[in-house]
Amino acid sequence: MSPISSPDGSSPPVRPANSPAGVPAAGAGGRPPRPRPTVDPAEADSRPHLTSLAADPTERVDDDRSVAERATRDLAAQFEDEKPGRVLTGPAGLLLTAAALAVAALALWQVFRPLSQGSKYYLIIFLAGVLPLVFLAYPADLRLRARLRARRRRTKDADPTEDADGPPPVRSTSARPTATDWVLVALAVAACLYPVLPIPVGTGGGGYNAFLDRQGLLAPMDLVLGTVLLLLLLEACRRATGWILPAVCLLFLGYGYYGGLLPQSWPVAHAGLDFSQLVDAFYNSDSGFYGTPLDVAASYIVLFTIYGAVLELSGAGRFFVDLSAAAFRRSRTAAGRTAVASGFLLGTVSGSGAATTVSIGAVTWPLLRRAGYPPERAGGMLAAAGVGAILSPPTLGAAAFIIAEYLGVSYLQVLGWATVPTVLYYLGILLSVEIDARRSGVRPVVIDVGSPWHLLARFGYHFASLIAIVMLLAVGVSATRAVVFATLLAVALSFLDRAHRLTPARLVAALVTGVRGVLAVTAVCAAAGIITATTTKTGLGPQAAALLISGAKAATSDPTLVLVLTALLAAVALSLLGLAVPVTASFVIGWVIVGPALIDLGVSAPAVAMFVFYFAVLSEVSPPTALAAVAAAAVTGGRLVPTMWQTLRYALPAYLTPIAFVITPAGLGLLGIGGAQRIVVAAVVIALSVTVLAVAAGGWLPGVGPAGAPERVLGAVAGVTLLWLEPVAITVGVALAAVAAAGVFVRRQSAGRAGRPRAGSSANLREEKP
């Protein structure tokens, strides 16, 4: 993310609010207690600072800024669900650009002129265009020893004297695909296009209709190329996301093949499938490679990634960060509020947790450090705010589109379900920011930027395309057409800013960036077909659901408690699953394995879908992996494990809120279902629950003072009790919260009396300030 500069191009001072007049701001090192009489010009030029969009639109974007932006994007890729890809140049780069433009054109064509052969035909062509690009864009990276050394270097404790204001390090990747990569590209093209090529190959081939007619009875060539595509997808997932997801897919494949050898008395045993049946399910059915996940990637996600790239290149990302800084520039907790607000606003166009974390961290970490935040605490705040990007309308994570397809509802309805939980999520983080500021004595920081009203007047048009998506969805326009129209609007509005107008060359760059952004997601979604097809063929979903419910019934026979225990077991299972695989795959697996258990207990499908979605997302802040926390630690230079625990503390209320979706019918109010009264009551009660849990986690009641262990325990119990959303539970929870607050007040009064100076003493009472 770019820095904020004053209109004259100089760096605006960012100084503690209580620093006396005439004392210069801290330098690039940002080591606050030691103000310097001067700032070295070279140092000032190199430090990332906030870059004002109120600057002259004709201002040239300098090389240093471009380098910092590229470094930030590269660092984001390293800690995303996907690994960093190659920067291709020469003929390979031209080929990738041409192929990406062709894929973008195909996706746009499908929106307005769908292929007459049907959606599956389109998915085959789409995968044939995308899968070969994965092998061009992502290196094999099989040097395990070197990768382990790099990981150790990345996660070791940072030198506390190291200047963290500099741009993040850039990881270089090979710019040239190898001979093996080109072989895999050729195989991918052949295996993907084989079902539609009208060329007889022995008893196989012959075109699309002939291929479909052989469903259930594959020809030898069908079996060979289906196996090749299976192996290629596993390798594409390994290159783009790592070893874990391919291992999970192989586990499901092994279960499908060897499950018939299990004792038939076991709940998960099945009759057994031979290899040809499995390949047929993957290659020639609607639940395999060309199932709903790939349909979502090809129909929705690619369009939204193009839209996000257009917004980013049009300057929207910089505007959102600048607006956040301007809105809170005079508050005591300006630095923390800016980080949280930036995460929310960037999340509306990003839909990516770790990438948003890196983007807001590159800009706001210097502010947080000057305010006195330790690296670990600042990293926790950045990671928690960044993960909210996947939860923030109108561009939720990829799994949200899968929800719409699985449940047969509009994407606007899914956005409605996500609105109140998103507000509650950021409410919890903001409360934690306020609590930390008061508990830790964070220094106020003045951010010398322009008025937010001036920014809105000049650059508020960046909100227009976001509003357009919601309005178009509201009047019945499909999500695919709505995002295309919003993209065209963003392109047109970009010409209001000369520095960011989307000329033909920049528009091509946006299209290519958008398609590259969907490569890893496409590989994951196609590979998820291995999981869904195996589950469907073997009946694993109902069997796993019965196993989960029986585990809860072993502890109690009360139906209500069975539901609660099942929800808790499901939450734990989803959290553990999300540690190993990307969010999209985690949702798909959770939906087919955990979802049926909750539905069998009478929970509505929307509540189950959002429950699975939220826990799949929150796995990004769950130790011991916590990808967003790892990204934040890389930005701040903080210790990795403490950063993870700080992230968990900031996001703790969000971990518990989704449980309210499923344990009581009143929880549907949080999803905007059930009438105005239910929605308002649910939102207010859970907001109180989030507040009490934030106080319990932070150990401080804003406006009163520190909370002791008894008050924190009472607060935690009150917060959990309020999740039940029934009259008795609400009454008990409110009463416990009131007792906890009264205890904090009494503790504050007792501490004040104990520390009161004697009459006539010259000592002055000073209230602790952040």
Image (cartoon, helix red, strand yellow):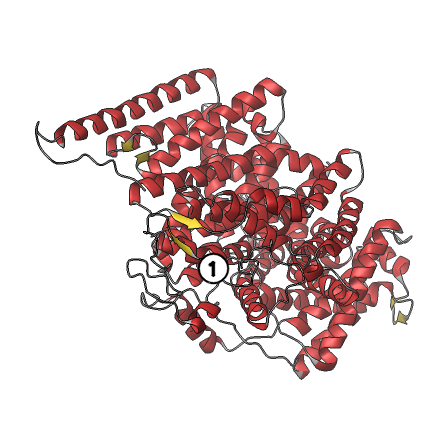
| Residue identifier under label 1 | 631
Asked which quadrant contains residue 528, the reply is bottom right
Query: The residue tagged with tag 1: helix, strand or loop?
Result: helix
**Residue at the location (58% across, 29% down)?**
603
Between 749 and 215, the one nearer to me in the picture:
749
Q: Residue at x 80, y 56 (%)?
A: 107
The quarter in which the N terminus is drawn is: bottom right
Q: Residue furthest bottom?
A: 179
Can see residue 237? Answer: yes
Nearest to the observer: residue 701 or residue 94: 701
> Residue 594: x, y in percent?
56, 41
Residue visible at 39% across and 49% down in the picture: 445
Residue 299, percent across and down? Answer: 76, 51
Q: Does residue 671 sit above or below 466 in this rendering? A: above
Image quarter (top left, top right, bottom left or bottom right) of the C terminus: top left
Which is more toward the observer, 94 or 30?
A: 30
Front residue of 181 and 768: 768
Q: Is residue 34 left or right of residue 586?
A: left
